[in-house]
Amino acid sequence: MDPNHLFLSLLKILLLFLLSGPQKVLGLSHLHYKHHGFQFKPTKLFVFGDSYVDTGNIGKPVASSWKQPYGITFPGKPAGRFSDGRVLTDYLARFVGVKSPIPYRWRKLGRKHLRYGMNFAYGGTGVFDTLVAQPNMTTQVDFFQQLIKDQVYRPRDLQFSVALVSVAGNDYSTYTARNGSAEGWQTYITQVVNQLALNLKRIQGLGVKKLVVSGLEPLGCLPHSTFTSSFQRCNGTENSLVNIHNMLLQQAVTKLNNQTKGSKIVILDLYGAFMTVFKNKGGSKFEKPLEPCCIGISTEYSCGSIDEKGEKKYRVCEKPEASFFWDTVHPTQEGWSAVYSVLHANLEQI
């Protein structure tokens, strides 16, 4: 299909969704509002999803998150986070008022380490299976359910808990990698959102009262998409697909919230937050917001790559704190901090 024709078709689809009824995007502030309004004080955070929230579930030999220079800002060495430092999980944990929960792979370290909840997220995963052979979201929820069955977490723990879900970007990159057709995008996006909604409902059914699910970030603005424009312009076609996903997610969450009493799902508007920072409304610290700090010396290499002689095949910027993106997909700690600040600022408007 001609790219221009595809773009126009996507705009028509977007218009239909916009005209289908009022849409309301909820941010992080809504969770905090309920926290105070109903004296809901969370004691645990349970996390499901991909590399935006993974804090160390993938083993060391496999993931770049365990290789230099990941983790150079925090904790000072590679520690399983796909960034130079903290990721979205760490900021939401701070907001909720708990420490960042322990990764699932370290669950046997002892009960005292389980007190703040657990992180089931694996980098590279999606709602469905992806090109990365790690547990998809359904399997991650299976892990959670088994821990409840084993009484590692009890009903009271779940009643005073929050679940964070960040997933789906890898589903779409997998669709592209498997040569999915342009005509099939809308059907596939619908399948992804429907399955995501089922997983959200399942987490609710296990007893979690508050769920935060992130909308998709502007995938067309990630460095692996802006590379062709020397990191100057976002890919509008990709972002149009993202907007369809986010609108369908809004509709699904609205439906779930109308069906469920005593429980609430909140959408974290990552798209809006990223774009706000890119437009410089989040501060002037990022001079070239679409350009990554750490990147391979050529297209065959990536951040953290070394050759058979152990020589570095990547370069790192002098000041990671001046970059929004760490590598071609993931924000820096400062990038996540800026996104969090935008979302947190919404609180003051309520």
Image (cartoon, grey):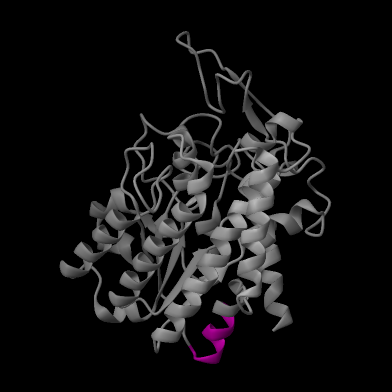
Residue 11, percent across and down? 68, 56
Residue at 70% over, 64% down: 342
Which of the 4 image quarters holds residue 205? bottom left
Position of residue 115 measured from the top left corner of the image (x, y, whole percent)? 34, 67
Q: Residue at x 58, y 40 (%)?
A: 329
Horizontal side of 213 relative to 322 (left or right) equals: left
Quick check: 145 above or below 187?
below
Instruction: Give the answer, above or below, for where 72 lies relative to 256.
Output: above
Query: Horizontally, is 271 left or right of 279 in the view?
Result: left
Q: Main secondary structure of the magenta part?
A: helix
x and y percentages locating residue 58 in the rendered image: 36, 41
**The N terminus appears in which quarter of the rendering?**
top right
Identify the residue shown where x is 75% and y is 44%: 289
Nearer to us in this view, 36 or 331: 331
Q: Is residue 37 magenta?
A: yes
How many numbered badges does the structure rendering display?
A: 0
Q: Is residue 151 left or right of residue 302?
A: left
Write the start and end of the magenta stretch as one range: 32-39
How far across and down, in percent of the image, does residue 158 sit?
A: 32, 76
Find residue 175 and report its image quarter. Answer: top left
Q: Residue furthest top?
A: 309
Residue 217 shows in this picture: no
Q: Quadrant of the C terminus?
A: bottom right
Q: Residue at x 54, y 52 (%)?
A: 87
- Residue 285 seen by the camera: yes
The question of residue 285 being in magenta is answered with no
Figure check: 243 above or below 298: below
